[in-house]
Image (cartoon, rainbow, N blue to C red):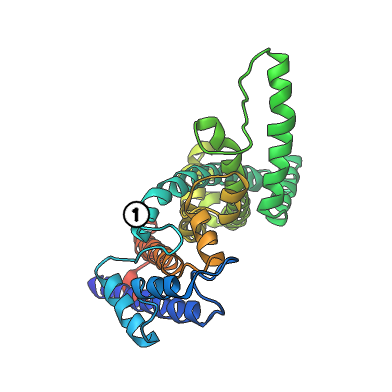
């Protein structure tokens, strides 16, 4: 077990190093440079800014300096958000993205588990067909279209009807911003819907495979209650592939969605990431990319180590 953990940690460090190096050189390979906007700065000001941010040094010196800063936990200072460090921006924006991601993840897991179980137990019946149609729609429709549609349906149609019918100024489904709970409902649904449909499809397939196993027939022959059979025998053995899928989703969901955050004007980390790319804010882009990489690699590591806890039959030693 210790050897496996050490091996995984070493692989994670190598992965992060390669991502850091690749991101650094790709950013500096792009045409253009910081501070070259629509209104060019005077040469003396531009020279001073380049010197201040170390852009006047050779590329290899900048690379070594960046590695040294990263090693000490310093992601640099943004060239767009003046006098603000990348770390402070991450500390401010990531909790918002994580809040949205946790809500969406809980919605996806709860909905996927319920609909996946119903679909498997009601195979080829009306409930199963309705859920399959829902899954196809959820997987096929892009999130920005679904977000716009729900903004129109719930925010612009249902909310005014609700206000007029009940004679209130309370807008139950605001279409933008991130303030109270009601502001989180639509973006949570949009961000979690695709993950929920994926979990539903995977759990249905896994449960259908488990249902045909001999130990399920034995449990039914013993006269065990249906709820006990479903929870303790079916779901317990069908959850491993679903756990793998959810583990892979966690990294992307908890870091937020660039598209969803822009559609709903959510002050999450996605806004800064998009702005940093378009403005060629090297430090911000590299810092956020590295942050994403570290987060996803750590989540994948925890997922791999969690297999033995979910199913003791999976031996970590066999994977070494």
**Where, by quadrant of the figure, is residue 149 drawn?**
top right
Classify residue 214 as left or right of residue 63.
right
| Residue at screen point 36% across, 83% down | 57
**Where, by quadrant of the figure, is residue 154 drawn?**
top right
Residue 201 appears in the picture as rendered: yes
Residue 312 appears in the picture as rendered: no
Tell me residue 163's x, y (percent).
68, 19
Classify residue 138 as left or right of residue 51.
right
Q: Quadrant of the N terminus?
A: bottom left
Rendered position, 71 above or below 207: below
Q: Nearer the viewer, residue 284 or 99?
A: 284
| Residue at screen point 31% across, 73% down | 317
| Residue at screen point 57% across, 44% down | 265
Q: Nearer the viewer, residue 204 or 224?
A: 204
Q: Nearer the viewer, residue 285 or 154?
A: 285
Q: Quadrant of the C terminus?
A: bottom left
Tell me residue 143's x, y (percent).
66, 52
Tell me residue 287's x, y (percent).
40, 66
| Residue at screen point 25% across, 75% down | 3
Q: Nearer the viewer, residue 69 or 236?
A: 69
Q: Secondary structure at mark 1?
A: helix
Rendered position, 192 above or below 316: above
Tell me residue 97's x, y (percent).
47, 49
Residue that lies at the very extreme toward the top in this rendered image: 167
Query: How many dots with numbers?
Result: 1
Q: Residues within 10 Å of mark 1 (few under 14, many from 20)?
A: few
Look at mark 1 in the image and give the residue it sits on: 88
Classify residue 318 as left or right of residue 140.
left
Classify residue 9 as left or right of residue 43.
left
């Amino acid at each position: 077990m210790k050897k496996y953990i050490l091996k995984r940690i070493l692989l994670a460090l190598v992965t992060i190093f390669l991502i850091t190096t690749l991101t650094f050189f790709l950013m500096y390979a792009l045409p253009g440079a910081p501070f070259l906007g629509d209104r060019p700065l005077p040469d003396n000001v531009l020279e001073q800014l380049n010197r201040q941010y170390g852009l006047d040094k050779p590329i290899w010196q900048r690379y070594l300096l960046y590695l040294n800063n990263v090693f000490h936990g310093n992601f640099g200072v943004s060239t767009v958000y003046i006098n603000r460090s990348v770390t402070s921006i991450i500390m401010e924006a990531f909790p918002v993205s994580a809040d949205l991601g946790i809500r969406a993840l809980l919605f996806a897991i709860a909905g996927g588990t319920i609909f996946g179980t119903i679909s498997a137990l009601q195979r080829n019946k009306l409930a199963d067909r309705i859920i399959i149609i829902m899954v196809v729609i959820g997987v096929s429709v892009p999130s920005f279209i679904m977000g716009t549609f729900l903004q129109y349906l719930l925010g612009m149609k249902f909310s005014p009807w609700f206000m007029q019918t009940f004679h209130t100024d309370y807008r139950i489904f605001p279409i933008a911003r991130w303030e109270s709970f009601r502001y989180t409902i639509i973006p949570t649904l949009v961000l979690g819907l695709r993950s929920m449909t994926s979990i539903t499809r995977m759990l249905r397939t896994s449960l259908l495979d488990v249902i045909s196993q001999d130990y399920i027939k034995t449990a039914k022959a013993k006269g065990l209650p249906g709820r006990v059979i479903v929870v303790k025998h079916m779901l317990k053995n069908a959850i491993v592939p679903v756990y793998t899928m959810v583990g892979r989703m966690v990294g992307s969901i908890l870091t937020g969605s660039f598209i969803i955050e822009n559609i709903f004007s959510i002050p999450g980390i996605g806004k800064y990431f998009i702005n940093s790319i378009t403005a060629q804010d090297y430090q911000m882009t590299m810092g956020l990319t590295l942050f994403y990489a570290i987060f996803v690699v750590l989540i994948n590591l925890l997922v791999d180590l969690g297999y033995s806890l979910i199913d003791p039959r999976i031996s970590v030693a066999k994977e070494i």
